[in-house]
Image (tube, rainbow, N blue to C red):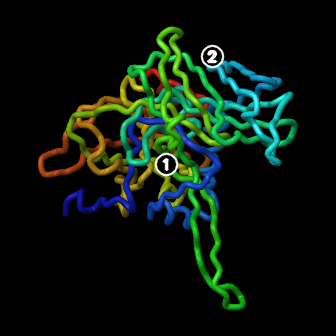
Amino acid sequence: MSINSIYVAGGAAVLLLLGACTKQMKNDLSDSPKEKLAASAAATPDPDGLKLHTFLRDNGPAFETYTVTLQESASFTTKSGRKYTIYRNALVRPDGSPAVGPITFTVKEISDAAGMIFADRPTATNTGAPLESYGEFFVSVKQGSTPLQLRKDSAINVQAPAKPKDQRIPMWGGDSSITVTTSGYNYVNQLITLSTTVSVNKGIDWQPVANPASAYALFNGANGTLNFRLDSLIKWTNCDRLMSLPNPKTTVLAYFSSNYNPATTTSFGGEEPTMLYFKPTGINSIIKFYNTIFTPPAGFEGFLSYQNAIPVGQSGTFLAISSIGGQFYAEQKTVTITAPAPGNNYTTVTFNPVPVSAATLVSLITSMNTK
C-alpha cells in the first residue's frame, strides 16, 4: 500500500496561502465538514493547547488606546505611523444619535509574520489564493462605557506608510468563528435546535470586502502612503496584494516524527497543542497548515496542505510548535518545495521538534520576520 493511499485529509484540506486581513467576533458561515466535526468534538479545551494559545496571545501584538475629541473631525496616529481619521456624524450611539465629544479608540495592528503567528491571523483567502500582506487591523470605539457603531455608509479613513508593488491593493475581511447548529429532543420530547459559536482552527477566513467604496487601498505616490477605509468596527480587516504563482503546484504533507500532540486532531480554534506555520521567503505572509493527516501510523502524524496548492520551487521557512505536558517543543526549518517523487502526487517535509524554553520560542517566532 502506498503512503498516498494511507493519508487522506479529513474534510476540506486547506492550506492558507500568502495572504492576510480578517473579521473578528462574527459568525463564520463556512460549511466545512471538518470544522463542524472538530467544533462538536472539542467540548473542553485541551490543556496543552490552552497553554500554547495563552502563551502566544500574551506575547503577541498589544491593543493601543487613543482618546480624541470629535467635533468636525478627529485623528490619531498609532505607534506604527498609521493615521486614523474619523469625521463628524460618522459614529452613532446605540439609539442612533451622533456621537460627539471625547471618543476612545482601541486598535490592534498586525504588521509582520511574527504578529500573524502570535495572534493566529495567517494570510490567505477563503479559497487558499496567495496574498502578500500590508497589515491587518482591528478597531473598536466607545464613548465612556458605551460602545459606538459606524453610521451606514460611513468609515474610518486610514493612511498607512507603505511601498506597495501595485497602485491598488484589495481589502479583505474575515471571520474567526463559525456557528455550529445541533438539533435534538428535550425532556418533554420537543425538537429543539441549539447554536454554538466556536473559533475556526485556520485562525481566520479572509474574503474580499463587499462594499465597493472600501474594497481597495489606493497608493498615494506624493506622500508614500496606502489610503483605505474601515467601514465596520469590532472586525478584522486586511490589506493584501494578490500574487501570481505560475509554477506547477503540489500537495505538501508535513510529518512529525516526534513530539506531535495527538489531541491536535480534536482541538479547535487556535487552541491546537501542535501547530505548523510556513513563511514564503521574502514575503510578508504566513501560511498555517491546520488540516491534520487522517489515521496516520506512528511517526507520520502531522498536517497537509490544500490538494495541489503549493508551488514547486517555492522557498520558505517552516515553524513547527508543540505543547506537551507543560513543555514547549519547536523546530524551524528552511526548505525549497520539491516536485513529487515519481509515482507520487505529494511532497513531504519531516519535523522533529525539540524542547525549548518560552524565551527561545518567542525568539524563533520573532525571527520569522526576517525569513
Q: Is the C terminus in the top left, top right, bottom left or bottom right quadrant? A: top left
Query: Left or right of 264: which side holds 317?
Result: left
Q: Which residue is mark 2?
A: 81
Q: Is residue 229 left or right of residue 261?
A: right
User: Is disc 2 placed on a helix, strand or loop?
Assistant: loop
Is residue 361 at least partly visible in the picture? no
Give the number of the mark in front: 1 or 2: 2
Q: Quadrant of residue 246?
A: top left
Within the image, what quadrant is residue 237 found in?
top right
**Residue 78 drawn above or below residue 258:** above
Query: In which quadrant will I find the N terminus?
Result: bottom left
What x and y, as percent, mark residue 20?
48, 36
Give the amino acid at mark 2. Gly
Crowdedness of circle 2 by 10 Å Cα count: few (<14), some, many (20+)?
few
Left or right: 287, with 22 as reference point: left
Q: Position of residue 70 (x, y in %)?
A: 80, 26
* Labels 1 and 2: the sequence-earlier one: 2
Disc 1 and disc 2: Cα gap in Å? 29 Å
Q: Who's the residue at 73% across and 42% down the image? A: 149
Mark yes or no: residue 53 visible: yes
Mark 1: which secondary structure? loop
Query: In the image, is residue 202 above or below residue 179?
Result: above
| Residue on which the image places disc 1 | 202
Mark 1 Cα within 10 Å, few/some/many (few <14, many 20+)?
A: many
Query: Residue reaching furthest bottom?
Result: 188
Report the residue at 79% width, 45% height from top.
Answer: 96
The spot of residue 239 in percent (x, y) is: 50, 31
Q: Is residue 191 above or below residue 135?
A: below
- Return the residue nearer the eye: 131 or 148: 148
